[in-house]
Amino acid sequence: MTKEQNLNDLFISIVIPMYNRSKTIIYCLDSVCTQTFKNIEIIVVDDFSTDNSVDLVSSYQDNRIKLIKLEKNSGAQIARNRGIIEAKGNWIAFNDSDDIWEKDKLEIQIKELERINFDKNTVVHSNCICLDLINNKTWEWKVPITNDSCYRLLLERPAPLFPTLLISKEALLEIGLLDENVPSYQEWDTSISLAKKCKFIHIEKPLFTYVLHQGETISKNHKRDIEGYLYIINKFKNDLQKYNLYEKHINLLAKRATSFSLFKEAENILKML
């Protein structure tokens, strides 16, 4: 199949999990609905919101939007998986319901896919802008994971955020979808799993803005942060040991727990050595 045929057949499903985002969902939708690449569908999966988020999505004037309402609060990973399953696109992109894409995000990523003839075992990701509304700070976050054998790199450090990722639906199905049990660091877990079969392409340009709101810092739930990191260490323990990274992560996590004043957790983590 030629690049032109692949491009003509390209249809991207954008999956957006949502829970109580009435203050942010509109600017999120604005950023995906105004993409320069138009052959898309937007799947908003509401995780049993208790505010008027659903009403706002329902009234948004774009017939490419599909709203799915979960019957109970289930978590972002379950919401994302439901979106992936329902997706009609052959490629999947994610956004979070409070983050903002650049208008040419998909167009830029698609150019990278064209270059490799739309190899389904490819993940395209980019830098992002972090906008801290609490402390009025802005910075660029770079996670330059690239090449055909990036598995070790992803074991070494946390991965690109979900809103930067463009992945084939087939690749996501082949890894068994997203792990619904990981409490945090969900994109890290997903990227490690994908790296077992996919190459990663990194775009240096920031293609979305991650917005940090009042009351939404990681410190809001330090314990869940530690639990998620620990989950990944345990899940990939054999490979971490293979690459001599296990002890490094245990020590880093213990220091992190101590910095959160979770002293008992830090003590238990060090016992894993």
Image (tube, rainbow, N blue to C red):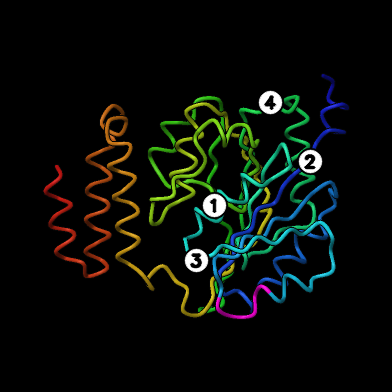
- Name the mark nearer the viewer: 3 or 1: 3
- Name the mark nearer the viewer: 3 or 4: 3
Say whether marks 3 and 4 touch (CB < 8 Å).
Answer: no
At x 24%, y 61%, the residue is 257
Q: Amino acid at mark 4?
A: Asp
Observer-nearest of 103 and 41: 41
Residue receiving disc 2: 11
Q: Which label was assigned to residue 206? A: none
Q: Amino acid at mark 1?
A: Leu
At x 57%, y 64%, the residue is 130
Q: Which label was assigned to residue 72? A: 3
The range drawn in magenta is: 50-54
Earlier residue among tags 1 and 2? 2
At x 80%, y 60%, the residue is 33
Say whether marks 3 and 1 touch (CB < 8 Å).
Answer: no
Dominant secondary structure of the magenta stretch?
A: loop
Q: Quadrant of the C terminus?
A: top left
- Name the mark nearer the viewer: 1 or 2: 2
Q: Are there few (<14), some (14-19), or many (20+) residues within 10 Å of tag 4?
A: few
Q: CA distance from mark 1 to mark 2?
A: 22 Å
Residue receiving disc 1: 161
Q: Are there few (<14), some (14-19), or many (20+) residues within 10 Å of tag 1?
A: many
Residue receiving disc 4: 119
Q: Secondary structure at mark 1?
A: loop
